[in-house]
Image (cartoon, coloured by chain):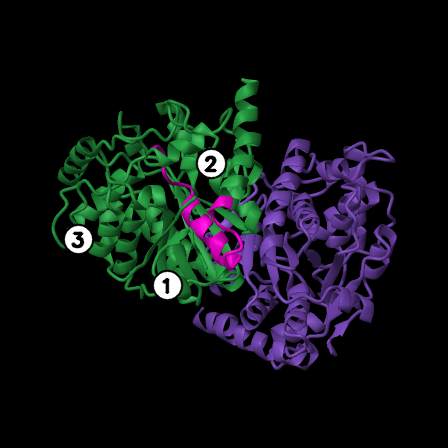
Chain colours: A purple, B green
C-alpha cells in the first residue's frame, strides 16, 4: 500500500489516519552560534532567522524576515520547501508554534511565551519554570489539536538542535555519541562531542537527573514544547508522529520522563536521515524507547532534476521542518494514492516557483 | 431537528457541519475605559483583564490573570462558562487568537501582533497598517482552519465592543443608533451615541469612507482580525459562523468591504440577544448584509437553578465569548442529539464547579 514508506506493517496499520494535522515548533538556541556546529543558515547572523523564516515560508511560500529562503552557506535550500509542497498537495492543516525564537515570525503563530535557549556551554538552556510552562502550554494545545485531528504530526526548526539533543541524551545516560545527525555530509561529531562535554561540566550534570531538569540545563526550548504538545494530544486520544531526525530521540526521552504511554507515538523522517551512515536514528530510538516505530519515506530526490533537491540525497540538509513526517502523513491520509514520486513532482514545482524564481531575481 | 435553534430551514440546511471548530478572538479597546460604557468586568481595572481571563477560562476552567472569573460589578459571570461547557460536551476544538489585549493571556494563543485599540474619542483606534496586517494574518489562519474544519465558528471577547461597532457602522452610513446590544439590562444608548458623535468628529469621518479605514479610525482590533479569519476560511471552502451579537454586524460590513461573497456566512447568537428589545441585531444585519442568516439558540436559562445563569435571561450579559454560536454549532454537529436543555445541564455543572466552588473559597 505504501511503497515509499519504510516501516513495519504493524506500525503502518497502527498509524492509519484520515485527518492528520501538522504543527511546526520553531525555536532558537544560542548554542547554534558556536562556529562550525550548523549550516542551517547562510551565515551566523542568518542562522538566528532560519526558524522564523521557515515558518513564514510554510505559510506564504516566501520569507518575510530574510530575503530569499533559508539555505546553507553553499546554497542548499531549507526542507521547508518539501513541507510546504506536501501540506498543500495533501491538504493537511498547518499550525506554527513560536517557542523561543530570536526573531518573531511574521505570521499567525501560537506563542508559548518562551525566551530563546541559552548557549549550553556557557549558561543554562532554559529556566526550569519555562520548561514546565512549555510542557503545560503544549498539553493545552495538544489536547485541542486531538479534537480536530486523529494524527498530530509535530515537526521542528531549530538550528543546532542535534547538539542540544546529544547533550540531553548524554545527560540522561544514553550513549548518543556519533549517533546524532547533521545538516552537513561531514557530520562534525568531534565538535559536537566537545561542546557537550563542556556543557555537561558547566552544568554540573550528575547521574540520575530527571529529563525535564536535563532539558533546562543543556536542552533547548523546542524539546519541552514538542513533548507537551505530544503529551496533550496522546492523552486526548490522538496518535502522534514526531516528524524529524535524531532530535526527536531527546523528545522521546522527555516523554518517558512525563510517564506518558508511548504506544501511540511514532517517529517519521526521510530516508536521508534514516539511512544516514554518519548517524544512527534507529539505534537512538531503541536505546531511549524501544518499541517506538521509526517510519521513513523515500522521496526519490536522487532522481530530481533540481540540484538543490538532489543534494538532500547526497547528505546535505536531509530533513527538518517536519518534511519527512509530513510526507508520510500525506501518503497515509491518501491511503497510498499519494506516493513518493507524486510528492517529488509537487516539491519540484514548489522549488521552481519559490527557489529558482527568487534566485533569478537576485 | 433543532427545536432550540431559531432560524430558517434553508439556513439550517446550508450550515450543516460535522466538524466545527471554534476560534475566540480576544482584544482590548481603551474605549471601554470610558465610565459607564461596559460592565464586562467588576471594576475598570479588571475590564482590561476580562478578555485574557476569558481566554484562560476557556482553556483551564479557571483564570490566571485575575482571581475568580470575569463578572459584572454585581457578580453576573462571564459567558465563557457557557462556551467552555459546550465545547467540552460537543468536543469542538478551541483556538484562541490574541489580537491586541492589554494583558497577554497565559495560554497557548495565536498572536496577531497587534496593539490594544485606542480610545476612539481621543485617538485613532488602530494604525491602518495594523488593520491590513490583522486581515492578512486572519486570512492565513482562516485558510488553515478550513482544512481541519467545515464550519469555522468565530467568537470574540472585547469589552466596549458594541460602542466601537456603533461607531464603525455609523461611519459607514448605517443607522445603528439604539440598535447595538449591551451587557446591561439598561442599555446606555445615549452614552454610546455621545461617544460615537465625539469619535466621528475627532476622526473627521467623512461620507463614503472604506470599511477598513473606518475600522482604523473608530473601530477596534477584534474587527479586522475576525474579518480576516472569516475571509480566509470562506476562500478555502469552509462555512463561517460569526458567533456574537451586534458587534458582528460591524464585522459583516468589513467583510463586504473585502468583496467577499457572503453566502457561506451566518451569525450565531443567543436568544437573549436575538430577542432583546433594547437592541436590534436582525435589523442591523438586514441593513448591512441582507441575506446573511441570523441563527439564535434557546438555552432555557430562565429555568436555571443558578441565579448567575437566570440573569442572562433577564437581560444581563446575554452573550459573548462565542457562547451562542458555539451552542448552535454543538446542536448542528450532533445533528440535534444535543439540545438546549442538555446544554443547560452541562453549563450548570460548569457553573457549579468553577463559579460556586470559587466563590465559596473567597
Q: In the image, B223: left or right of A216?
A: left
Crowdedness of circle 1 by 10 Å Cα count: few (<14), some, many (20+)? few
Q: Earlier in the sequence, mark 1 or mark 2?
A: 1
Q: Nearer the viewer, residue B118 or A264?
A: A264
Is residue B330 magenta-colored? yes
Label ID, residue A309: none
Using the rendered image, report if marks 3 and 1 lie on a common chain. Answer: yes
Q: Which mark is residue B209?
A: 3
The residue under label 1 is: B9
Is any part of residue A8 visible from this angle?
no
Q: Position of residue B289 (x, y in %)?
A: 25, 58
Q: What is the chain letter for disc 1?
A: B
For marks 3 and 2, give the CA distance.
34 Å
Instruction: Find residue A305 and report its image quarter.
Output: bottom right
Bin the neighbour count of mark 3 within 10 Å (Cα to Cα): few under 14, some 14-19, many 20 and up.
few
Report the residue at 56% width, 70% height from top. Answer: A85
Q: Is residue A294 magenta?
A: no
Above or below, comparing residue A84 to residue B219 in the picture: below
Label 3–label 1 contact, CB within 8 A: no
Q: Position of residue B151 (x, y in %)?
A: 46, 60
* Earlier residue among tags 3 and 2: 2
Q: Give, as a single range, the part of the protein colored magenta.
A: B316-341
- Residue occupying image coordinates x 55% and y 51%: B90
Circle 2 crowding by C-alpha within 10 Å: few under 14, some 14–19, many from 20: many
Foreground residue among A112 and B197: B197
Screen quadrant of the N terminus of chain A: bottom right
Q: CA distance from mark 1 to mark 2?
A: 33 Å
Q: Chain of mark 2?
A: B
What label does residue B54 carry, if any?
A: 2
Mark pair 3, 1: CA separation: 37 Å
Q: Secondary structure at mark 1?
A: helix
Query: What residue appears at the point 69 percent right and 78 percent down from the top-left corner?
Result: A300
Amino acid at each position: 500500500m505504501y511503497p515509499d514508506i519504510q516501516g513495519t506493517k504493524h506500525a503502518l496499520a497502527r498509524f492509519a489516519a484520515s485527518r492528520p494535522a501538522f504543527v511546526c515548533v520553531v525555536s532558537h538556541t544560542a548554542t547554534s552560534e558556536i562556529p562550525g556546529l550548523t549550516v542551517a543558515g547562510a551565515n551566523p547572523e542568518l542562522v538566528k532567522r532560519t526558524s522564523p523564516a521557515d515558518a513564514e515560508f510554510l505559510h506564504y511560500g516566501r520569507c518575510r524576515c530574510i530575503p530569499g529562503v533559508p539555505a546553507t552557506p553553499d546554497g542548499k535550500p531549507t526542507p521547508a520547501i518539501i513541507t510546504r509542497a506536501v501540506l498543500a498537495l495533501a491538504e493537511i492543516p498547518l499550525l506554527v508554534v513560536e517557542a523561543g525564537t530570536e526573531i518573531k515570525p511574521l505570521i499567525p503563530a501560537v506563542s508559548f511565551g518562551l525566551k530563546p535557549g541559552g548557549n549550553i556551554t556557557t549558561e543554562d538552556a532554559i529556566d526550569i519554570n519555562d520548561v514546565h510552562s512549555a510542557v503545560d502550554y503544549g498539553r493545552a494545545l495538544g489536547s485541542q489539536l486531538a479534537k480536530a485531528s486523529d494524527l498530530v504530526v509535530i515537526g521542528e526548526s531549530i538550528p543546532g538542535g542535534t547538539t542540544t539533543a546529544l547533550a540531553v541524551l548524554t545527560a540522561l545516560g544514553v550513549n548518543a555519541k556519533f549517533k546524532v545527525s547533521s545538516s552537513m555530509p561531514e557530520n562534525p561529531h568531534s565538535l559536537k562531542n566537545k561542546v557537550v562535554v563542556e556543557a555537561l561540566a558547566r552544568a554540573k550534570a550528575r547521574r540520575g537527573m530527571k529529563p525535564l531538569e536535563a532539558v533546562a540545563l543543556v536542552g533547548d526550548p523546542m524539546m519541552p514544547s514538542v513533548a507537551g504538545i505530544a503529551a496533550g494530544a496522546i492523552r486526548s486520544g490522538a496518535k502522534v508522529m514526531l516528524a524529524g531526525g535524531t532530535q526527536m530521540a531527546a523528545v522521546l526521552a522527555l516523554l518517558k520522563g512525563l510517564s506518558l504511554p508511548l504506544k501511540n507515538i511514532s517517529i517519521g523522517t526521510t530516508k536521508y536521515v534514516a539511512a544516514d551512515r554518519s548517524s544512527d536514528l534507529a539505534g537512538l530510538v531503541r536505546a531511549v524507547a524501544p518499541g517506538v516505530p521509526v517510519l521513513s519515506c523515500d522521496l526519490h530526490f536522487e532522481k530530481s532534476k533540481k540540484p538543490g533537491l538532489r543534494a538532500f540525497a547526497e547528505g546535505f540538509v536531509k530533513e527538518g521542518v517536519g518534511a519527512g513526517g509530513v510526507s508520510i502523513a500525506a501518503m497515509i491520509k491518501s491511503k497510498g494514492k499519494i506516493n513518493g514520486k507524486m510528492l517529488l513532482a509537487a516539491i519540484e514545482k514548489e522549488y521552481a516557483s519559490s527557489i529558482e524564481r527568487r534566485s533569478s531575481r537576485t
